Image (spheres, grey):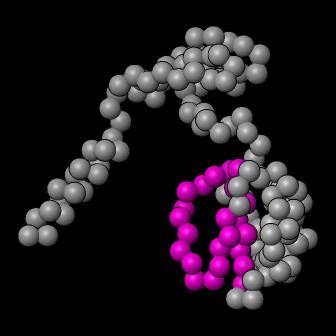
Amino acid sequence: MISKLIPLVLVASLAACAPTGRQASSAGADGTTSSTASGTTDSTTATEGSTDSGGGGYTPSYAASQDCDAQPVQKLIGTKLTTSVENQIKQASSSSKTRVLKPGEVMTMEYDPRRINLILDEQGALTALRCG
């Protein structure tokens, strides 16, 4: 029974990910609107600060926020993670989010440029600090 459902589930998941060719419209924070259809972008209003180069690329909604920079906090590797250390890392790296990863924990692979990952060892000390 299950072996008959596997192809159905695979086809359904592929269909859900396929481009539909439908037109979507979005409005930016500066009042510009753009429409997307089959990978093309048409900006209807060009204003100062607009990053649309007419190349048809996708601009994620978080592009205007501050991206993480892990370089200034690398000196904290080896430090035991506490709430105050985590807040210091968040502020110094310009991150809006943190994710603590302990040994053996499963992590998702989505990339978030606003997040800093705090990788710990068994004793709770920082072994790596990476953005994403």
Q: Is residue 11 left or right of residue 115?
A: left
Q: Is residue 32 above or below residue 115?
A: above
Q: Can you tell which quarter of the image residue 52 is in?
A: top right
Residue closest to the far top? 45
Image quadrant holding the N terminus, namely bottom left
Is 122 a magenta residue?
A: no
Q: Image point 53% across, 64% down: which residue?
A: 108
Is 65 placed left or right of 12 in the picture?
right
As drawn, which residue projects farthest toward the front?
A: 83
Q: Is residue 41 visible?
A: no
Is 11 in front, or is 87?
A: 87
In the rendered image of this protein, does residue 24 appear above or below residue 74? above
Segment tinted magenta in the rendering? 99-121
In which image quadrant can residue 22 be found? Answer: top left
For the C terminus, the quadrant is bottom right
Residue 2 percent location from the top left of the image = 14, 70
Total marks in image = 0
Residue 64, x across and y down, in percent: 72, 34
Residue depicted at x 17% and y 59%: 7
Placement of 75 over or under 67, stated as above or below: below
Residue name at image x 22 percent, y 57 percent: 9
Residue 131 visible within the image: yes
Report if residue 115 lies within the magenta region: yes
Left or right: where does residue 104 sit relative to residue 23? Answer: right
Q: Main secondary structure of the magenta part?
A: loop
At which x and y percent is residue 8?
17, 56
Task: Using the rendered view, name the quadrant where residue 47 is placed.
Answer: top right
